[in-house]
Amino acid sequence: MHDALYLVVDLGTGGPKVGLVDARGSLVEHVVASVTTTFRADGEATQDANEWWDLVLRCARGLLAEPGRARRVRAIGVTGQYGSTVPVDANGAPTGPCLTWMDTRGGPWSRRAVGGPVQGYRPRAALAFIRHSGGAPSTAGADPVGQILFLEHEQPAVVAATRWYLEPVDYLTMRLTGVASATHASRLAMWMTDNRRLTEYHYDPVLLRLAGLSDQRLAPLVPFGSSVGTLRPEVADQLGLAASTVVATGIPDLHAATIGSGAIRPYDTHLALSTTSWISCPVPTKKTDVVHSIASVPGLTNDDYLVINNQETGARALAWLRDVLAGPRVPASFSELTALAATSPAGANGARFTPWLAGERSPADDKSARGGFANLSVTTTTADLVRAVLEGVAANSAWLFAHVERFAGRRLDPVRLIGGGAQSDLWCQIYASTLDRPVIQVADPLTAQLRGVAHVAASAVGEATLGEAPLPRPGRLFEPAPGERALYGAIARELPRRFAHERRWRRSSR
């Protein structure tokens, strides 16, 4: 099947990317669409799942319009955001908006279920969750447990119309096939599966009882990377594809990024500089660092795991600054901003930026944390501000990186960088010097997840093996700059102190 194509979707928080990947793992073409998130003062952060579906169909039709492409599509793969909840009816149609991973309205209900005096948790509940799944529901409510508890207690009309609570990636596979499904991986942010036993496909009754939930609206679990089913006839007609086209299980962007970065061997490390940011590598065992919100979760096969953690603001910080600087004018491009940042020296003439614009999870869990600039003067320039953002995000990653290395029990070297932020050579160099590790700028870093999920789609039809993904094209290597290592190391060491100071200030001002 050397001429095979795989239709792939990466449903990010900002909107879907839809692409076609060939049998060699090369991206043929892709398109990007954006979606709107509704934020309200009560903690709401929702998106319209019907809007996702319409955009995915529209983008896919455009890609498949070129003669000969549709007949070559062998399978479809979906990846994207996780830790969100889409309530749907028996046909897969949304019964309400998607509660995204930023929605905190379920916080009071989560705290009532599992909250207590030990780091915010009831000891018995925390021990059971960590022993069985490796993590625990957030007491801030910003995960599927909090979201479902919120719906169950405060949205009775939605619940009455709902058959399934799905993650976004599983929602899209159901819209494609009509089949409700989930995997240990797609459900990782719920912490409701016994991750000591990855070949047992059911939700853990002990954990469900502790959270006050039932599994009656949780989709059946199936093996990672398997076939969910084939296209609904009406969807096949809309896309011009064969009704026999296979749809693979939805996978989190963490897993797609691992494959797309080429970091699939034990302890091979990638760092995602996307809307959010994380640092991950495959590890052989289930493990949890409760204090720093790091765990290992079901990986690419039934006998391995991936390190999971999350920093709520990654490259999104640069997008925020761009929009603030633009005001009512057309925003500058990211390449223009990073070119401007390059005119400011390392250290941004003393300007500092803390990137906790949406709170933080790893290595310190605090949804109320807030970012900002410090050490500004009348001589601070726009270039200094932009560079300070690049350096602050990298310093935040370095704070987490030290704990990930301790979690892994070894030096992690080199680090593969993916995501929209990794398109910037300047940012890659700042990362190399801040982490004090060689950094590989993965080729086409923005679309690594599309290539990764294509490999999963190929495995679902027997044309690839999950544990043996092809390496991406060689990327560019950035070494730590001798003249920057000490400076950036000092900036990174400042960050935990700034975090603690900001936390003390908030508590004292209540």
Image: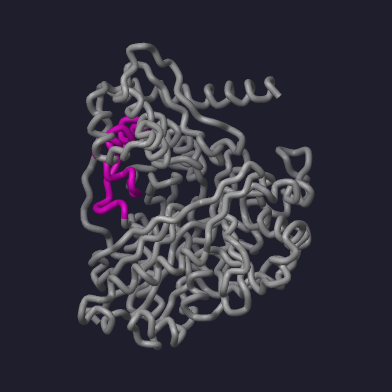
In the rendered image, which quarter is residue 31 located in? bottom left
| Location of residue 85 in the rendering, given as x and y in whole percent from the top left corner | 60, 61
Residue occupying image coordinates x 54% and y 50%: 38
Quadrant where the C terminus sits is top right
Left or right of 71, for residue 218: right
Q: Residue furthest front?
A: 328
Look at the image and say whether residue 46 sits in the magenta stretch.
no
Residue occupying image coordinates x 31% and y 20%: 381
| Location of residue 122 in the rendering, given as x and y in whole percent from the top left corner | 78, 45
Look at the image and say whether residue 424 sits in the magenta stretch.
yes
Left or right of 181, for residue 467: left
| Location of residue 102 in the rendering, given as x and y in whole percent from the top left corner | 57, 48
Residue occupying image coordinates x 41% and y 77%: 460
- Classify 435 as above or below 409: above
Quadrant where the N terminus sits is bottom left
| Location of residue 333 in the rendering, given as x and y in whole percent from the top left corner | 27, 41
**Which residue range is magenta in the image?**
417-446
- Classify 185 as above or below 344: below
Q: How is the image coloured?
A: one colour
> Is any part of residue 106 visible from this angle?
yes
Q: Residue furthest top?
A: 378
- Classify 451 as above or below 329: below
- The foreground one among 344 and 93 is 93
In the rendered image, which quarter is residue 116 located in? top right
